[in-house]
Amino acid sequence: EGRSAVILGAAGRDNMGQVMARTFAREGARVMVAGRNEAALRAIATEVGGRYATCDITKKADVEALATAAVAAFGNVDVAVNCTGWGLMAKLLETTEEQLDQLSALQFKGPYFFLQAFVGRMAQSGGGAVIQVSSATVHALLNNHAAYIGTKAAGEALVRCFANEFGAAGV
């Protein structure tokens, strides 16, 4: 009740981000949804009585703009959720450099930018919570998932590093 939440990855129809937006709104949070599909974002923002912003997590400037817009709209951000991802299933020896670059940008560089943009702002405003959605597959050995599992596991390591550095600041 009365908290603010930003959910990045809420443009897919009835995806996890949209479910989270509905849940946060139902519990009384002020919600901003973000992603790449403006029409879908506008629809879910209207549905939950929230705001939206377009954002490509692989672009640092987009993520910084999202954090700036959220702080301008809400005064601060209490919860920031990143549930972007791409479930690439490709054989280890057949994964292309282009696929690996795309997946690394989406599931490693993007989360790094997301944490940089929100954690510092939260620490300065007295704390907050960042939720980085990962996958149970990081704890499994599955064929045709090496790039996906590797980049999701790297995202989990990032969260631990940021938590170590900013936990004392309430983030």
Image (spheres, helix red, strand yellow):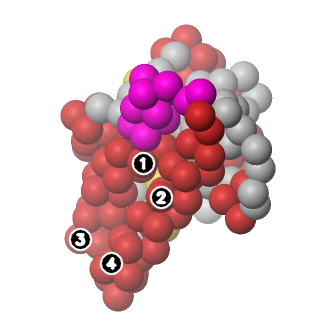
> Residue at label 2?
154
Q: Name the amino acid type tagged 1.
A: Phe
Q: Which badge, 1 or 2, is on the more N-terminal residue? A: 1
**Hey, which residue is sitting farthest front in the picture?**
93
Residue at position x 72%, y 22% in the image: 13
Secondary structure category for the residue under label 3: helix
Q: Which badge, 4 or 3, is on the more N-terminal residue? A: 3
> Residue at label 1?
108
Q: On residue 166, which mark appears? A: 4
Whether residue 125 sits left or right of residue 131 in the image: it is left
CA separation, marks 1 and 2? Answer: 6 Å
CA separation, marks 4 and 2? Answer: 18 Å
CA separation, marks 3 and 2? Answer: 26 Å
Q: Is residue 59 visible?
A: yes
Q: Residues within 10 Å of mark 2 (few under 14, many from 20)?
A: many
Q: Are marks 1 and 2 in contact (CB under 8 Å)?
A: yes
Secondary structure category for the residue under label 1: helix
